[in-house]
Structures are given as C-alpha cells and as structure tokens.
Image (tube, rainbow, N blue to C red):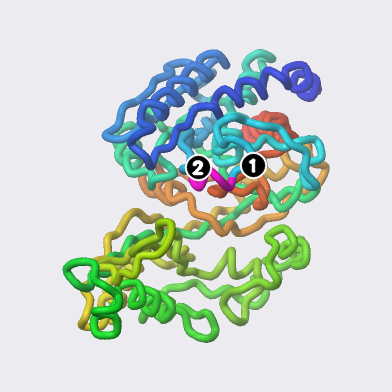
Amino acid sequence: MSDIKQYIEQNKQRFLDELFALLRIPSISADSAFAGDVAKAADFVAESMRAAGADKVEVCKTPGHPIVYGEKIIDPSLPTVLVYGHYDVQPAVPLELWDTPPFEPTIKKTELHPEGAIYARGSADDKGQFYMHVKAFEYMMKNNALPCNIKMMIEGEEEVGSNNLADFCIANKERLKADVVLISDTSIIANDCPSIDTGLRGLSYVEVEITGPNRDLHSGVYGGAVANPINILAKMIASMHDENNHITIPGFYDKVAELTAAEREDLNKAPFDLDVYKKDLNVGDVWGEKGYTVLERTGIRPTLDVNGIWGGYIGEGAKTVLPSKAFAKISMRLVPHQVSDEITELFKKHFESIAPAGVKVEVRPHHGGEPVVTPTDSVAYRAASKAMETTFGKTPVPTRGGGSIPIVAMFEKELGLKSVLMGFGLDSDALHSPNEHYGIVNYLKGIETIPYFFKYYAEGSK
C-alpha cells in the first residue's frame, strides 16, 4: 500500500466534496420533521457504497429509520470485518450559537486544526468518521488491496438509542456473520498522540415530570402556600449529589467495578494537561466526584447529569406565574458491571420517594445501554494498534472512553462479536454541541489508516 498517500492526495478534494454533500443533508433522527432527510441520507450512503465497489447494497427498512447494508466477499474462507457507523445526527439547536450554518459545511483553521477543520453537524459524529471507511474501501477495491471480506452496516437511529438495530441483527445473523466489528465513532487523545478506546460507559436516560396544582397559578395569590413544581424539581435534583459529588441513589454503586491502584495508575499515564483542558472549556476549575482524577471521572466512574430542564414562563418580559408542571431530562453514565435497566429502576424508586406530598412524580425511561470493556490482546486490537503506529508514527495509547455506544454490548450478545473502537476525532470537536467540527487531517488520516487495519488483521488471522 505504498501508494495510499498518493491516492488520497489525488482524490482529496473529491473526498471532501462527497462528505460535504452528505453533511448538507439534515438527517436528524430525533425529529420526525426530518424523516425525509434521514431517508435521503440513507440513499446517499447506499449509492456511495455501490460506487466504492460493494455488492448486495440495500437500504433495509425498519419500524424507524433505515439501515444501509453492503458487502464485498472476496473469499468465504478469509476473515470478515463488519464495519458499523451511523448516518443520523443530533439536533442542531440552539441555532443561534453556531458561528456558521450547521448544515452548510465550512472549513476554518484553528489552533488544534491548523490545516483546517470541517464545521458542520455530524462532521465528527459520525458522518465524517464512517465515510472514511467507504473511501478506504474504495481505495482497496481500486488497487486490488482488499485482503479479507468486508461488510458495512450504517444505521440511522444511533442518536435516538438504536431502537431497531438489535431486532435487525437477530433477524439477519447469517448476513451479518463476521469475525470482528470495526467502529470509528470515538476519539484520539491528540493528533500527535493516537489512542484506542478499550472501554465505554453505559447509559440510562430518563425524563421526569413534576406536577403540582391542576393549573398555573398567580404567584402572588398562591405563592408560599402551594408547592412550586420548578422549586421542588430543583431541590430533588440537587439532593442527588452529596457534598463530595457522590450520587445519593441507594444501591447506585453496588455493582460498580472498582479498579486496583495499579490499574488506576496505568489509566492516568495517558497524556493529559489540566490547564489546557480548562482553557479549552473556558472554566476556572474542574468538578466531579471527590478522590478521582479527570481521566477517572470520565472513564471509570458513573455519573448523573441533567441534560435539559424546563417549566413555567420563559418568554420575553415577566409573567408572575406559579407553574403547574416542571420537567427535566436526566442521563446516567454507567460503568462495568452496572445494568441500565436496574439503574433506571433504582432512579425511579428513589426519585418518587423523595417527592413531597404536594406534587406528583412521573419518571419516563427513554433508552439505555450497557458498559463494555474490549480486549487488548486480540488479533483485531493488535491490527488496529499496528495500523495507527504505521500512519501516526507512534503506538496508540489504550484509553477508556467516557461516552456510550450501546450497540457494542449488543453486538457481543446477539452476534457474538467483539468490537475494535478505532476513532480519529478529538474530544474538543464539540460533538452534540454547536460548532461541531472534524479536522481535515483526521478525516484523511482515517482513510489512510483503515486499509492498514485490514492488511494487518488478515495477516494476523492466518
């Protein structure tokens, strides 16, 4: 593959143009108003797979958004890599916080991306990262360099919990039969310090509703005599952390896997500059569970965070109202060996128990996923490590990711497959936030690295 850099350089503008066309499609899976755009993105992905050389490409219908599947079987006796990604994206709101339109890709140079970064919703999560695989596959096909079989499954519901993916996998076990899953939906420590995630946190996501009086009330006539749902909700949420930022739900930590002192020491060997971290976020100090470092708080400890809270009057001017209802969306990141359904039930039981008699509480579970730890002694991990070492010039550092990809545990359960998490983004790429971006260097480096993974995986599997 000595010519891969030349191939990328010759096709760089086309690779960018194609990604930009995909990024212009507002494939927001959470909002039914964009269902047509999600379908349009699926068709785009399918056509891109065909153009790259895939066979049996299909836009597979589900009760929700479609899954795009394609494959290239060169020899059934050779190992098979199943590539997973997602073409759906998070909502772009609040739009006023974007410096450029979220669905009009714009290249801007930054301190971390002096060669330029692509600003657009989905650029790093996950359109830019899964599209690297399509272009890497194109290179391998055009240069007769595909050393093993490949199957690609790109879904459209990852950002809303992958509700239909497990059923699809169960119904298509033979079609999805493979030896390993390769995923690029994670990050590296820095462009000069590659890394591979070897673990991900799980997730329990709920919405809560607090109801007080049967209607909004005049805050002067009734204030002080009737429970205000917003005040009550704020107190209930505040009570869920103690003075050490330890979560107060009874039983919450019962199954948390505690790392040994040696394991914690190894985890903290990953390069990390606290001053740079705070500067990037423009915060005076970090915050979290007492007794743990930032890397531990984001990698091996569970959390509880409010993702949204609302109620009452928030329009222009004043309206002195005591609201009837208040709401919040709350996520809990989980670690081995916590179970999402069990944590959701513990939350529900505790949240209902701490509500005063003056209000009613409803807890509505949304979606969840299980935490995972991936092996570092497998042929696939060694292939990923060697591939990154080849293109970055450095051995990647094994790290624990703070985010959640619930389907990783599902792949192991339903398909019996381990995953390799070989992502190329940066944590500072503003995933799920206004001004999401993805470095051009990162995009092209992924296209360069992925064929080496296939090469080393095929060699190691002999």
Q: Residues within 10 Å of mark 1 (few under 14, many from 20)?
A: few
Quadrant in the picture for residue 225: bottom left
- Which residue is at a point 50% across and 80% down the rendered structure image? 246
Closest to the observer, 275 or 253: 275
State the image coordinates of residue 315 (x, y, percent, origin top left).
Answer: 40, 57
**Residue 192 appears in the figure:** yes
Question: What is the three-letter code of the residue carrying label 1?
Answer: Asp
Give the side of residue 248 with respect to residue 22, left or right: left
Question: In which quadrant will I find the C terminus?
Answer: top right
Is disc 1 in contact with disc 2, using a CB cutoff of under 8 Å?
A: no
Q: Magenta region: which residues?
A: 93-97
State the image coordinates of residue 152 (x, y, percent, origin top left).
Answer: 49, 28
Quadrant in the picture for residue 37: top left
Point out which mark residue 46 bears. Answer: none
- Which residue is at a point 44% across and 44% down the rendered structure image? 159
Which circle's residue, 1 or 2, is located before the other in the chain?
2
Question: What is the three-letter code of the residue carrying label 2?
Answer: Ala
Residue identifier under label 2? 92
> Looking at the image, is 213 positioned above or below residue 100?
below
Closest to the observer, 279 or 323: 323
> Looking at the image, is 179 positioned above or below residue 53?
below
Q: Find out whether residue 282 is within the magenta segment.
A: no
> Looking at the image, is 150 positioned above or below residue 188?
above
- Which residue is at a point 29% across and 85% down the rendered structure image? 224
Quadrant in the picture for residue 17: top right
Point out which mark residue 99 bears. Answer: 1
Question: In which quadrant will I find the N terminus?
Answer: top right
